Amino acid sequence: MRIDILTILPRLLDGPFADSIMQRAQTKGICKIEIHNIRDFSADKHKSVDDYQFGGGAGMVMLAQPIVDAIQALSEQTIYDEIIYLTPDGETLNQSICNQFSLKQNLLLICGHYKGIDQRVRDHYITREISIGDYVLSGGELAAAVLVDAVVRLIPGVMNDETSALTDSFQDALLAPPVYTRPADFNGYKVPEVLTSGNFKAIEDWRMNEAIQKTATRRPDLLEQYNKLTE
């Protein structure tokens, strides 16, 4: 997979992809992540990327020209399956969307700033708009990092144990059950006996029951989805 990211603050994305699973995915050649500075595509001699909004009001708007020129220049080199704009008013990111994106070959992500990007870019060049939650960040960089991490970890070969991602929360519309490690007795707090019984059928049943109970308590909306899936 190839992921290109357009931003006016490329240094904000240096850290998230330099360690752990993201670094391993790139080292293995499974995923290539390229970060591009939108200012490099500005036709303005001062490399401006924003201007006042028509109609007045507080806050600047990102210019269409640098973004569109960047999209067109990169599209000459790569055919993108999706051109994604990170924005608070996009569809809320979930595991299902991450699963969909993980099957793609090439993604282009655009990080907004200020009051956002000129609507004409959204209307004519963006194929998908994604939000990571009902709140506003200073820019789309952190949202892009979240999206990339959530997607790349699902690609076969990225994680040492590929089955691990299949048992994460939300994969089957349930929250993940509790997990424990050694010692079995820590300060008098003991691991549930079933987990040390060696009875794998009983362990799986316990985990499923715990997942259902946790989901019912914390996310009843998800439990409704699970019940529909299992009907």
Image (cartoon, rainbow, N blue to C red):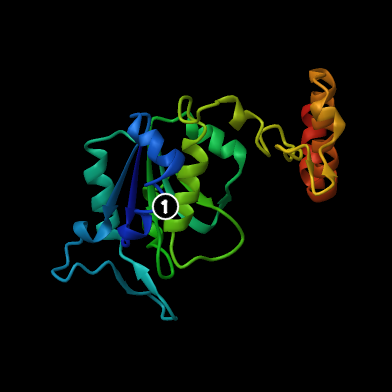
Q: SS of the residue at dot 1?
A: helix
- Displayed quadrant of residue 65: bottom left
Q: Which residue does the image show at 48% across and 54% down from the upper left?
A: 143
Q: Which residue does the image show at 21% across and 45% down from the upper left?
A: 73
Q: Which residue extends farthest left?
A: 45
The residue to which callout 1 is attached is: 123
**Residue 104 can be seen in this image:** yes
Residue 130 placement, left or right of 43: right
- Displayed quadrant of residue 54: bottom left
In the picture shown, does residue 1 fall above or below 20? above
Where is residue 150 shown, x and y percent of the image? 52, 42
Q: Which residue does the image show at 48% across and 43% down from the upper left?
A: 149
In the picture shown, does residue 166 fall above or below 87? above
Residue 203 placement, left or right of 3: right
* Nearer the observer, 76 or 125: 76
**Residue 231 can be seen in this image:** no
Q: Which quadrant would the N terminus be assigned to in this image?
A: top left
* Nearer the observer, 155 or 131: 155
Q: Mark 1: few, some, or many residues within 10 Å (few <14, many ≥20)? A: few
Q: Which quadrant would the C terminus be assigned to in this image?
A: top right
Where is residue 90 shown, x and y percent of the image? 54, 53
**How many circles with numbers are drawn on the protein?**
1
Where is residue 180 shown, x and y percent of the image? 73, 38
Q: What amino acid is found at the position of numbered circle 1 in the picture? A: Asp
In the picture shown, does residue 85 fall above or below 200? below
Where is residue 145 shown, x and y percent of the image? 45, 50
Q: Which residue does the image show at 17% across and 62% down from the upper left?
A: 43
In the picture shown, does residue 114 fall above or below 153? below
